[in-house]
Image (cartoon, grey):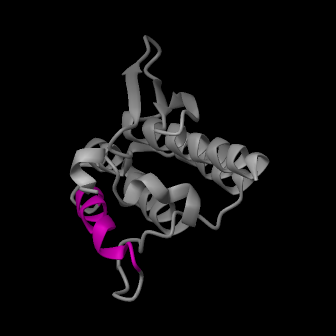
Amino acid sequence: MNRESTGHDWRDSFAARCEASPSELHDLAAACENTAPRDQRRAFERVLALLNTGGFAPVRDEPHAEASLPVALLADSGAFESAALALLPTRASFTGGRLADGTFVAQVILPSGAGAHSRAGRSLAMAWLAALLRALAREIVEQRSVR
């Protein structure tokens, strides 16, 4: 099956290979929401490391390290919104915006149907990351309950 035609890619299997617990994902989501705009790169480092994507310095032996390199490069160059969107699975649905008080909101619904939101991000990129992490936590819990 052609990966491009199905929309499946390395990001579609985060939950399957993520060794973090749902509570760790929720904690990191809260940390992302509270991340100051100037500290976003550090938040991306933590997210990539927790999702077992190889982080900012991919190790060749890690199966998904090369695929996450573009996300790391975008974050490293300061293109945080682009990096956050690049982390989303191809078939995920997402929204995001800024409220009148200057905080950012986001929602992510994964291809599995697991979804979550962020209501108090200090930047749009961090709100998307927080919503993604919470959706992954929910997906992990739902997959475990099916087994």
At x 65%, y 63%, the residue is: 20
Give the overall secondary structure of the magenta segment: helix
State left or right for residue 74 relative to residue 115: left
- Residue located 29% across and 59% down the image: 71
Quadrant assignment, res 57: bottom left
Per the image, is 11 magenta? Answer: no
Q: Residue furthest front?
A: 1
Spot occupied by residue 14 in the image (x, y as percentages of width and height): 50, 58
Residue 56 point in image, percent of width and height: 36, 72
Q: Is residue 64 above or below residue 75?
A: below
In the image, what residue occupies the spot 38% across and 46% down?
A: 89
Residue at 43 percent of width and 20 percent of height: 102
User: x, y (%) of residue 37?
Assistant: 39, 43
In the displayed structure image, the side of residue 137 where residue 123 appears, left or right: left
Q: Is residue 136 left or right of residue 91?
A: right
Vertical comparison of 54 with 79: above or below: below
From what the image shows, is residue 62 above or below residue 124?
Answer: below
Residue range (magenta): 63-75
Q: Nearer the viewer, residue 132 or 78?
A: 132
Query: Is 13 placed left or right of 139 in the picture?
Result: left
**Residue 31 percent location from the top left of the image:** 59, 48
* Image quarter of the N terminus: bottom left
